[in-house]
Image (spheres, helix red, strand yellow):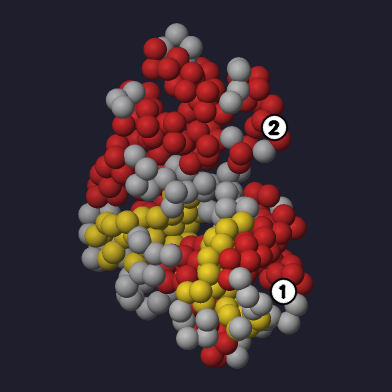
Amino acid sequence: MKCVLGFDGGGTKTECVALDPAGAMIARGRGPASNPTRIGFDAAATGVKQAADATLTALKQRAHIVALCAGLAGTAQPENHDRMQGLLEDAFPGVPVKVCTDLDLALAAMPDGPAIVLVAGTGSAAVGRDGAGRQLREGGYGPSGSDEGSAFDIGRSAVDAARARPESDAAAELSRQVLRHLGCADWAAVDAKTSIAADDVYPRVFPVVAASADAGNALTQSLLNDAAQKLAAIALRLAEQLGITGQAFPLGKTGGTIGRSQFFDQALDAQLRVKLPNATISAVSVDAAETAARIALRLVASGEGARS
């Protein structure tokens, strides 16, 4: 049977959805990470291919892929986009391929007109458009120069804070929880893991911080307040670039840190209301992989594909 594939890939996993030519979902699968700036381009292409294989296996019948759209974090830079485009064309020979960013998928789910989507997951970024349809982004270029307020940033800050204040009861409790969660006997073991793959360490600390803050730990609440301020600052910078700060517009929140902690959600909303009082804030409920698959359907209808 014929199908299209849509992918939503980031720093920890890749979701894939298959649709039939009529637009009905027929299978779903998952693969490993596919953000090339974090794991490398070949590994990212492999993550996409493994997600596709898992999806086609779930389909339980032979399928012919007629187009695919991969919304991948880490592909905003033109050179990254072009390299991933080439790798996926090689991985799926003869299949029309469109590469875009995960942020593009989130913005596509927003109402028409001015809008912003703030993404807070393994990394962080914001994407938005003005009333004329001009689209801009802020951040999302990896932990070395951006990703403020992300799970990676929060986890790294939590590890630093726990180690720097051993005399504090709050830090001592955080240390115990982090080491237990990571399966490490001491901080030297954490350092060893981090030196190999920081993405396998710092984002995993976020759930510990979130639960601790909800339980009233003053240190982790401070860390999440700082992260909320950083994320709101990203959204404000983008709104200023778009020239929409004085307008009413929807601001959607999405990503793996959203909805995980009542304290963090409230802190982020409070900061966003201070910096962008005209925005209507809500969580974005969107299946990004399905959105990508529907873009792939449009490729089939329009005859685009490898040229995109």
Mark 2 Cα within 10 Å, few/some/many (few <14, many 20+)? Answer: few
Write the residue at 38% across / 23% down: 219
Label 1 sits on residue: 92
Q: Is residue 111 above or below residue 103?
A: below
Q: Amino acid at mark 1?
A: Phe
Q: Amino acid at mark 2?
A: Ser
Residue 90: image x %, image y %? 77, 72
Residue 41: name its quadrant: bottom right
Write the residue at 60% across / 23% down: 184
Residue 272: image x %, image y %? 29, 49
- Image quarter of the N terminus: bottom right
Residue 307: name its quadrant: bottom right
Mark 1 Cα within 10 Å, few/some/many (few <14, many 20+)? Answer: some
Residue 124: image x %, image y %? 48, 50
Please indicate whether residue 27 sits to the left or right of residue 230 in the image: right
**Of callouts 2 and 1, which one flags the residue occurring earlier in the amino acid sequence?**
1
Q: Secondary structure at mark 2?
A: helix
Q: Is residue 270 above or below residue 91?
A: above
Q: Report how far apart the C-alphas of labels 2 and 1 lie in the structure.
A: 34 Å
Asked whether residue 308 appears in the rendered view, the answer is no
Q: Is residue 190 above or below residue 23?
A: above
Please indicate whether residue 91 sits to the left or right of residue 223 in the image: right
